[in-house]
Image (cartoon, rainbow, N blue to C red):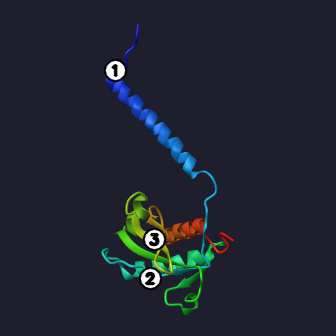
Amino acid sequence: MKRRIAPKTRGFVVVGVALVLAGSAQAQTTTGPVKKLKAAAIKVTMIESNEIKLPAEFQVSLYEDLIQQLQNKRGVPKVYREGDRNADNIADLVVLRTTVTGFKEGSERLRQVTTVAGATSITVHCTFADVSGKTLLEQDIKGNVRFFGGNLRATYDFAKKTAQLALDNFSPNAGS
């Protein structure tokens, strides 16, 4: 006697098998060492905030925290600010352009009282490019402050994540 599988059950089996295969394929692509790109230095441009209304203190804090976190990460190439003429003649210069794509200013007072409400978040699109403008790496990075701390702590969180991204993908001696 041949057993038949109900159409509803057959659909769940197909979806389950597809998820298992997708998960194993994803696991295979993420294993192994990540090939780093060569970058003698990183030049950080000013934070752009064209469509999002961003308070001035957040814009300045984003830029300063980003510079500081990149400089503090061991293994990250030398960091230059926008306008620094010393960066003009560097062969493997990578330019970091950042654009704010999302911002929600929370309430420090509400976070202190409830610890679950009043979160501040900022989303920034980061583009690492060579001097000619060819994109080497792009990623949206989100900075948050959810529990304790001032609203500007979200800029520190963003800077820390961006510095880690630079460390993971760029090296002064890669490819040599």
Looking at the picture, which amino acid does disc 1 mark? Ala
- Residue 99 picture quarter: bottom left
Q: CA distance from mark 1 to mark 2?
A: 60 Å
* Residue 105 can be seen, yes or no: no
| Residue lying at 47% horizontally and 42% vertically, measured from the top left | 22
Give the label, 1 or 2, closer to the camera: 1
Residue under label 2, please give it: 46
| Residue lying at 37% horizontally and 26% vertically, measured from the top left | 10
Looking at the picture, which amino acid does disc 2 mark? Met
- Residue 93 picture quarter: bottom right
Label 2: few (<14), some (14–19) or many (≥20) C-alpha neighbours in 10 Å: some
Q: Quadrant of the C terminus?
A: bottom right
Label 3: few (<14), some (14–19) or many (≥20) C-alpha neighbours in 10 Å: some
Residue under label 1, please give it: 6
- Residue 5 picture quarter: top left
- Compared with 120, 12 (above or below) is above
Residue nearer the viewer, 57 or 113? 57
Task: Find out whether the residues at labels 3 and 1 contact each other: C-beta distance under 8 Å.
Answer: no
| Residue lying at 40% horizontally and 63% vertically, measured from the top left | 119
Q: CA distance from mark 3 to mark 2?
A: 12 Å
Q: Position of residue 2 (x, y in %)?
A: 40, 11
- Sequence order check: which comes first, mark 3 or mark 2? 2
